[in-house]
Image: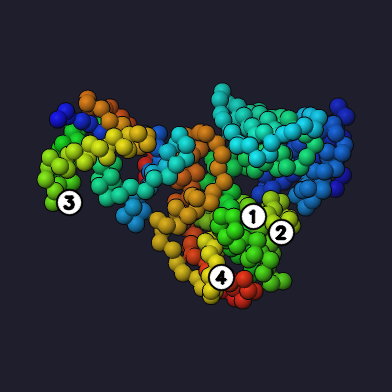
Amino acid sequence: MSSLYVARNPRVAARGLDGEMMIMSGRDSTLFTLNKTATILWQSADGATPLKEIVESKICSEFEVEPAEALRDAETLARELANHGILQVSEQPIAQNLSGGESQ
Amino acid sequence: MSPVVTEAGQLSLVIEIGEMPVRVNTTDREFLRILQHRYAGYVNAGGNAEIEFDIQITPSGSADRDADVRVTHSGGRWTLTRGDFRAEWEPAQRRGWIRQTANPYSIDAVLRIVHTLMLARQGGFLLHSASAIRNGKAFLFAGVSEAGKTTISRLAPPDVTLLTDEISYVRRRGDGYVAFGTPFTGELAKLGENVSAPVAALHLLAKGSENRIEPVPAAEAARSLLANLLFFAEDEELVQATFHSAFEFVSRVPVSRLTFVPDPRVWELIR
């Protein structure tokens, strides 16, 4: 399995409220509400930490799931979020300005 | 109020909504008369304007008012298009033009778009909601078509001042928000009063078998507000600004679900 890196797309607006993470695409104004796993992924997506490490440290501990299965699911989720323009996915670390459009 | 005739023989009128005066210039006297009637109560013939539009009247044709609106920004210029109009506006110059037939609907759409663009940078917005003033406080009643905006407006008792039954105008002011009357009407086809008041509450409308008000969790309130905002621009910066404005609003204004039967007693809950 290849090593993947994920980063927040700075061209979206994001807010966390009542434990829910809401994200609006700057491209077409579509509003997304992230589930718990996607929220962890979003909050950890710094472009520098490998997805495998995020899964092991943040997702496996939260959901009591096997690391290999969790990584497969996380890769699928990351690519889906990338298709919606929410995350960037790369096999190399991603340099980014994390300030983006987010505020809490 | 009489229009102003400029040196160039143009007829000119200032339409002031939400404390933002917009001057429109035309050489077509009949179109000017249409505007005076359409925006009665919002016309300020002699005032200064923040934005000025020259209107180019085209011959009547088969313009499609149901076509999608496109609002794009490039090189400091906004371009607004729909089947029945084309407009351009340069905010830095405070000037623009509108090309349309002599009807009140096209310019109405342009004004709504221009106001949303201006408000987005100032923390305000236009909202699909009825709004009204009671006891010096403004109440917003949001909902999609058929949610009951016109119904609750019709049921308002005499001490209520109706601001609109369709599109509310909300401006950020200090730590709160102010709602203004608008000429943007729904089924009621009655212009709102050109007055304003601090916003006391946003009610999300739902029809039911009894009248009741229930608080709405903040996340749901933000989602509902975003779903009812008028926003047209394909512009990332303004999308982000509008998104954050919605969250600011729900952090400062109580949001509730107002379930009501078509009965005037619902107004006993609105005070």
Q: Amino acid at mark 3?
A: Glu
Chain letter of the residue carrying label 4: B
Q: CA distance from mark 3 to mark 4?
A: 43 Å
Nearer to us of marks 3 and 2 is 2
Task: Classify B193 as above or below B258.
Answer: above
* Quadrant of residue B105 within the rendered picture: top right
Q: CA distance from mark 1 to mark 2?
A: 9 Å
Residue B106: % across, % down: 71, 39
Q: Which residue is mark 3?
A: A62
Of helix, strand and loop, which one carries label 4? strand
Asked if the residue at tag 2 contacts the one at tag 1, i.e. Cβ–Cβ closer than 8 Å, the answer is yes
Asked if the residue at tag 4 contacts the one at tag 2, i.e. Cβ–Cβ closer than 8 Å, the answer is no
Q: CA distance from mark 3 to mark 2?
A: 53 Å
Chain letter of the residue carrying label 3: A
Q: CA distance from mark 2 to mark 4?
A: 19 Å
Chain letter of the residue carrying label 1: B
Q: CA distance from mark 1 to mark 4?
A: 18 Å
